[in-house]
Amino acid sequence: MIRVLAALLCVVSIVVLLVLVRPPGDGPDDGRTPLRIWHPWGGPLLEPWVDAAALYERTHPDTRTRLLFTPNDLANSQKFFTAVIGHCAPEVVFVDGPLVSEWAERGLLTPLEGLLREAGVDPERLAGEFFAPCWKQCVYRGHIYALTYCADPNFGFAWNRGMLRRLVADGEVPPGTIDPERPPETLADLDRLNAVCTKLAADGGDQRAARLGLVPWGIYGNANSLFTWGWAFGGEFYDDVHQRVTADDPKVVAALEWMSGYAHTYGFARISTVAESYGMAEHNPFVIGRQALQVLHVSGLANVQRYAPSMDIGLAFLPQPPGGERHSAWLGGWTMAIPGGTDPARRAAALRFILWACASQEGTSMAVRTTRLFPGWKPSAYWAEAAKFPHLGVYVQILAECRHQRPVMPVQSFYVRELHRAVDRVLRGERHDDGTPVSAAEVLAEASARTQEQLDHVLRRPGAGSFP
Amino acid sequence: MSRTSPLARFGAHLLLAVLALTFVMPFAWQVTMSLQSDRERARIDPGVLPAPQGAAEAIDRVTGRHLAYQPTLDNYTHGIKRVPVPLFLRNTVLVCVCTVVGAVLSSSLVAYGFAILRWRWRDPLFHIMLATMMLPAQVTMVPVFRIWRDLGLVNTYAPLIVPAFLGVPFFIFLFRQFFLGVPRELVEAARMDGAGELRIWATIVMPLSLPAVATVALFAFLGAWNDFLGPLIYLADQDKYTLSLGLAMFRTQYHSEYGQLMAVATLMVLPVVGLFLLAQKTFIQGVKTTGLR
Amino acid sequence: MKVSRENRLGLLFTSPFLLGFVVFSAYPLLASLWYSFCAYDLITPPVFVGLDNYRELAHDPHFLQAAWNTVVFAALVVPLTMGLALLLALLLHLKLRGQALYRALFFLPSIVPVVASGVLWLWLFNADYGFINICLRPLLSALNHLTGAHLAPPGWINDPHWVLPALLIMSAWGVGGNVILYLAALGDVPRHLCEAAEVDGAGAWAKVRHVTLPMISPVLFFTLIMGLIGAFQVFAHPMVIWPNGGPADSATFFATYIFINAFVFLRMGYASAQAWVLFLVIIAATWLAFRATRRFVYHDGEGG
């Protein structure tokens, strides 16, 4: 009986293994170089990507692309890390811009400059072809680790022109106080406009806002909001020459104080309640018409056109804070890279694909046009085309003037989380044990110090800088 | 409960209905989102009652609020086209069936060793087994992946299925608790009759624990059906992906398709409900005291 | 060495588990213990640093907050879900029409895939237009009217005081699995015992207390232990809804903080140290649960 049991188990396991185990090969060997590409493009961006890869195969008959969708969430970094550790990473991978330096520091990415030269591309010349922040976010410790695939000009300032016109027409605001046709030029203009747009619900304890102006922290999270306004105020977050974390820059502090002013004037709970629903485009309060003003991502434009096609909006640069930057903007978006430890024989093919997608006429028009995202490559013929779409031209200008990218440092994620927490504490009005509220200056100093400690730790660890 | 008064029955029904309504809420909203058009979902006050066009307008007119919406199946038709649902479904079913078979077989055998047999290292080993569940998977994942890589089985279904054949601690523990309730005399009597342990497992212990078998099968199926991290980490060919990864394909950085996501998620829920309705029958009639003899 | 027949049989029956343990569990377990004494970023080789990681976490305010949040959550969620599941199972065990349908409805929230349910929770708990507050608003409004109070529906996602209640409600929605386990156990409660109790004139509560509960105690025990382990490792809900740790760190838990350290900050060594602290905490809690329930768990077959 025991033997039967043992035999049964063995048979079952062998059958399972035989049925399931297929060599993790590259598919049929047809002489073409297989290129495994991991990309985060789902939803309506899935088909454009499949089409782009098909086009590449047609124009590059020696290469076979194998696309793999990998979700854009934290679980996905587990997939990428385990793959690199297990030496089964793909040839091409998409990396969120600010993560390039962080991953390069650990050897997760392959430096590209040697490959570029082998391919006959002068890195210096290529650098000049990209918008400056697009290039900067990809260079770490003097090596090029990625090329920018999509450049997000963060952010446009959008206002619901139709709503403001109605407010004027219905006499809800005194005539002459606002001009629905023009964006606020300065922060003071914005504050005035915002006061007019915000209407709080009357019924006692209820934390609702019937209509809102701007929620200064309500887009892409606390940290990105602080980046937006910190740079607009003229602040800087990182000194990469001296490797100093500078979130306690007085101008960043001033930005956070201005943001928290909105929390205290209008009630943090009341307005962040509305901001909660930013996650889904179709519930975005700007899209459904509850919010008159929003700091809008370029993809937000497409969402407005899809979910609220009749909405009449205006778009402009961010208003200028006192003593701050005019036309302030920073860069977001995705880059393409070759993971560390990939088969050297396929790196040239991988680079060729990345160059095609990020820095060729065919690639930038094909891969980017259908998605309405921007390439980071200045010579693209796409720019003339993009300017013709309604409002997209404004974003083209914003990108052209964009000066910042998130800190290129190896503890970027840690920093972002510390910034998130700092903003959270101030907006919420956290208090010391003695009842005094915590100040923007002290939470940012704390965030700076904690991040600096981590940074020093990583930079001084044994073997630091041993990559590539 | 043979002599329940009609009043008590009514009370129980009322309580159950109210509670069931609360429990059904998230799913009801899921279905609602899947049936709504883009414009409907983007309203300040999306409708909640599906109704044909004329009726929807009439309801809104009479109540003076926007309550009714006109349902559409667009999300279903487009969702199924965007993601290769039939292929992913086949993969998922393959993984699920193997997992269920493996989990029920191996876990019940191991549990037999922990519950029915008496031997020297039984309790220490049982405690070690419990302990393996207590270290969070986040820190063991990378070494486990390395082992599968060294075995050459990454990008196959083996890492998703083979562990089920090696006894799942959760199910072993569950089976053990049920097996402990099997009357000792039955086992002893069978041994006296010369039955081997495997025969006792097959003819006495398992039939007496049918509710546990059904429960483990259901849980194992559901676990594999909805598993996200396992397939994500171990599969590197899109033709091998499972449905739960397919669901993630409706979300992306800039533009997500929540209507289609909810549509496919709804389709994913239905087979499990069907299985549940099949399995739940075994819970009702106890077997230990009524069956068999 | 001679291995007796009993021991050989025992080893043979448990061999699938033993094989799995040796091949897939033992090394990762020991490896993570080793990493906890190392500076290890997942990719470059680990470097031994002694007790540094453990020393650091004793002073890490976020870790201490996470530990406290987890303990409070576990202390509340285990009795809540066990009690609710038991109540539902007893109701669903009654001989009524349509029970199959009811059972399925209570199981529904446990079936929805997490990619979809994250979106659903955010909708349900949205302070502004979420379903829960839509229901609460008229109730509170009436109450305010009557008493002159100023009660407002809570900000489930954004208010640090309401994050824990929100998580408990989410857990309550997920009791379907426990309900099934209890139903499966209730099916085995011998009818003659119930009838005997009825003959003795026992009321409904007395029957539950003296017949039903002891008879299903092995399964209650199972859900207690597994509930404890699951609660201490709570991960999915907080991670999906509060990926940044929640307002004032109120949604930071052991497992989420471990994950963030391991896969976002790339500090696997530090994460492993936390994991081993958590491991010891769970062992202690489980041991207490074993001790506390020893008297109450009844086994028909064998005394222990």
Image: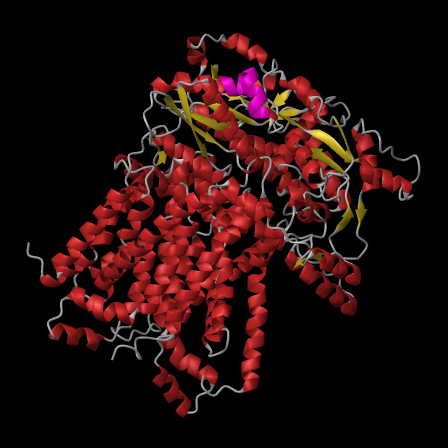
**Vertical placement of A52 versus A46: above or below?**
above
Q: Nearer the viewer, residue A347 or C68?
A: A347
Taking the spot 72% from the left edge, 36% from the top edge, the residue there is A294
**Quadrant into which the N terminus of chain B falls:** bottom left
| A68 versus B99 height, above or below | above
Color scheme of the displayed model: secondary structure
Chain part drawn in magenta: A356-368
Residue for point 66% across, 32% down = A297
User: Which of the pair A40/A398 is nearer the observer?
Assistant: A40
* Residue B266, horizontal then vertical, whole percent: 52, 53
The image position of residue A312, as x and y in percent, is: 78, 36
Image quarter hosting the C terminus of chain B: bottom left
Report the residue that reaches farthest toward the left. Answer: C2
Against B176, residue A321 (above or below) is above
Q: Is any atom of residue A181 visible in this view?
A: yes
Q: Residue at x 52, y 40 (%)?
A: B82
C249 left or right, relative to C145: left
Q: Main secondary structure of the magenta part?
A: helix
Is A358 magenta? The answer is yes
Q: Quadrant of residue B193?
A: bottom left
Can residue A240 be seen at all in this image of the molecule?
A: no
Considering every residue shown, the one lying at the far right of the view is A175
- Quarter occupied by residue A131: top right
